[in-house]
Amino acid sequence: MASRAKQPPPLTDGAVSLVAGRFRALGDPSRLRILRQLMGGERSVQQLLEDTGLSQTNLSRHLGVLRREAIVERRAEGNRALYRICDPTMVEVCDLVCGSLADRLAADLEGFEGAGI
């Protein structure tokens, strides 16, 4: 007889909203590009502008979303604003998703090779 997987405890409506907000914050390609840059360490706004190719307005808006969701934090250094990832689990989540996609794409490519494509 198959055993049933243990069910996690239910989440309150408020907790579900918090989780959904976190996933929404990760659901935008520009924000993922910002996070990818911040995975290399703290970056200034100027560095992020150069590395992502976003406009100042767009970058500020995306950083605001990431700050509201407590994914990144800002600190001032003189007249510069520096950002860093403040929730290390976000790096783990991104690594898990990217690793899973890489595995899937590798398997898909093997299928093409076997088909003579």
Image: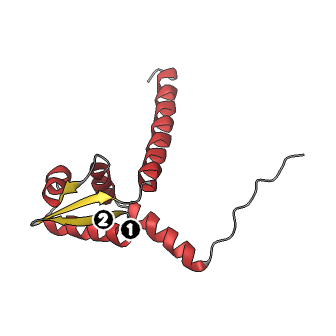
Left or right, 59 with respect to 32, comes to left
> At x 28% / y 71%, what residue is drawn?
64
> At x 49% / y 73%, what residue is drawn?
18
Q: Position of residue 89 (x, y in %)?
A: 46, 55
Left or right, 34 with respect to 22, comes to left
Q: Quadrant of residue 10?
A: bottom right
Residue 15, placed above or below residue 88: below
Left or right, 117 with respect to 31, comes to right
Q: Position of residue 36 (x, y in %)?
A: 31, 49
Q: Which mark is residue 70?
A: 1
Pick out the residue farthest to the left: 79
Nearest the viewer among 111 and 36 is: 36
Q: How many marks?
A: 2
Nearest the viewer among 54 and 91 is: 91
Q: Amino acid at mark 2?
A: Glu
Pick out the residue farthest to the front: 78
Mark 2 Cα-neighbour bin, 10 Å: few <14, some 14–19, many ≥20 = some
Nearest the viewer among 86 and 1 is: 86
Using the numbered discs, state the Cα–Cα distance from disc 1 to disc 2 in whole angstroms.
Answer: 7 Å
Q: Quadrant of the C terminus?
A: top left
Q: Amino acid at mark 1?
A: Ala
Q: Position of residue 98 (x, y in %)?
A: 43, 44
Disc 1 and disc 2 in contact, CB within 8 angstroms = yes
Q: Which mark is residue 73?
A: 2
> At x 52% / y 75%, what residue is drawn?
17
Mark 1 Cα-neighbour bin, 10 Å: few <14, some 14–19, many ≥20 = few
Residue 98, placed above or below residue 8: above
Q: Secondary structure at mark 2?
A: strand
